[in-house]
Image (tube, rainbow, N blue to C red):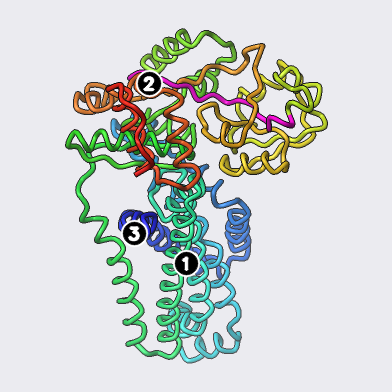
Amino acid sequence: MNSQLAEAWAHLPAYLGGHVAVSVTALLLGLAISLPLALLSLRRPTLRRLLLGFASVVQTIPSLALLALFYPLLLGLAALSERVFGAGFSALGFLPSVLALTLYSMLPVLRNTVTGLMGIDPAINEAALGVGMTRRQSLLMVELPLALPVIMAGVRTAAIWVIGAATLSTPIGQTSLGNYIFTGLQTQNWVFVLFGCAVAALFALAVDQLLALMENGLTQRRRARVTAGGIGLLLLTAAALVPGLSQARVTYVIGAKPFAEQYVLAALMQQRLQEAGHTATIREGLGSAVIFNALAAGEIDAYVDYSGTLWSNQMHRNDVKPRTEVLADVAQWLDREHGIVMLGSLGFENAYALAMPRPRADALGIRTLADLAGRASNLSIAGDYEFFGRPEWEAIRKAYGIAFREQRQMQPEFMYEAVSHGDVDVIAGYTSDGRIAQYDLTVLADPKHVIPPYDAIVLISAKRKDDKALLAALRPLIGAIDVTSMRGANLRAADGKASPRDAAQWLSDEIQRKQAGTKPGGPVR
């Protein structure tokens, strides 16, 4: 079996179990809220308009944005609960995902329930009341059975929407089939992407067909079909959840941002912990703000961040100091404000850097950001999803007066292909990325030093600061990774030649080789 496919199968119990858990919970909660509200609003036009209007507005919000908005909201509520009641709750992953997907499921159920009930011929209602039925009896015994096909169509639509949108819950820490897709996009592992899409589609189709069987049974009053559909849904849910529930309890949780280097470093940390006899899992695909807040809240135990990111985004500093001073200030701030331990620097820097193809830079005489400023009005630039909203970009614009003809955002993996094919002229790349050399790009110098240093640093949550086992397993990595080795590992993971785990093993071998003073080894295992 293909190694990438084998790895995809190995992740299936955890990823599918998480996906099913969040999807089923959100759908059941959505039904429990939407159906009573629809019935309540049936003879209340104002309430009906308000409910349908609210649900329609929710649908206009992109599902990824809706999922992301719930995380900071719940994080604040968790902190408030901790202060007031002495007990908080997890704001990462499951809860924000369930709440957002619940809202996302409401519109089709509300609309179809109202439409189905209001579409019944008034003469039928009058006849029911005429034979002595109360309005409640008429609703339960006449109107709802007649409206069931329309209502079930809404339930089926809601189920498909929720299962599809649940793949987007990965960036807020919920394990789902989206882990395949996000990891695959970042590492160009198209087997992962296709596998995740295929499993999500099959799961959605299976749920839809079982709901259709129940709908048919309800319409034709065939109890056996309703029972078979219900049992099928229960068996499908159990089959997805049980393998994940039977897995061993995890001791440590490692975080990872959504790019190849982070996947490799998280896998390296996981391997070190496993070699020391501990269990560890990875929460991957977390944005910069989400992952830091998760560490501060104790939702994850450790991850690798960058001194410049914390300096600009968390500390809101716009001055630039030497690397050693930045590291010292960051360490003091982390301990003082959050109780977080900065274990130390891994030994390399991964800074943002503007880069362009060497022949193009030579032809235009561009060597520095100051040179670029005079040409930028005729050029286009591409950056990742964070870059143009970060303080570093604002500092570059102000310091050099750079204004590009066009700004484009895209996956980091696609930026390099885009600039090499001339689709954009400049990219905001990363200094530890092996594709800088692979695509023969010129990194433009920053003579005014407005971009802060970006040392890769290991952070430990406050609740684990005295965990000797964790510290002992990770401390040997401090100062052990040079930028050349990191570029080699990144290139292996980013071009799809190796999984993050394989690239991490290669990096581990490189660390041991250099510490032993031996010559480079062979290809990726």
Of 337 and 323, the residue lying toward us:
323
In the rendered view, tell whether residue 435 sits above or below residue 5: above
Residue at the disc numbered 2: 338
Q: Are marks 1 and 3 in contact (CB under 8 Å)?
A: no
Residue at the disc numbered 3: 9
The magenta stretch is 340-360
Measured in 3D between alpha carbons, the distance from the residue under mark 2 to the one under mark 3, in whole angstroms, is 39 Å
User: Circle 3: is it few (<14), some (14-19), or many (20+) Cα within 10 Å?
Assistant: few
Residue 368, numbered circle: none
Residue at the disc numbered 1: 201
Of 154 and 48, the residue lying toward us:
154
Measured in 3D between alpha carbons, the distance from the residue under mark 1 to the one under mark 2, in whole angstroms, is 42 Å
Which mark sits nearer the N-terminus, 1 or 3? 3
At a point 44% along the width and 15% down the height, the residue shown is 330
Image location of residue 498, percent across then percent down: 41, 46
In the rendered view, tell whether residue 151 sits above or below residue 470: below
Which mark sits nearer the N-terminus, 2 or 3? 3
Q: Residue 512: tell me if it is visible.
A: yes
Q: Is residue 164 magenta?
A: no
Image location of residue 118, percent across then percent down: 59, 77
Image location of residue 224, percent across then percent down: 32, 87
Give the SS element for disc 1.
helix
Give the SS element for disc 3.
helix
In what quadrant of the picture does the C terminus appear?
A: top left
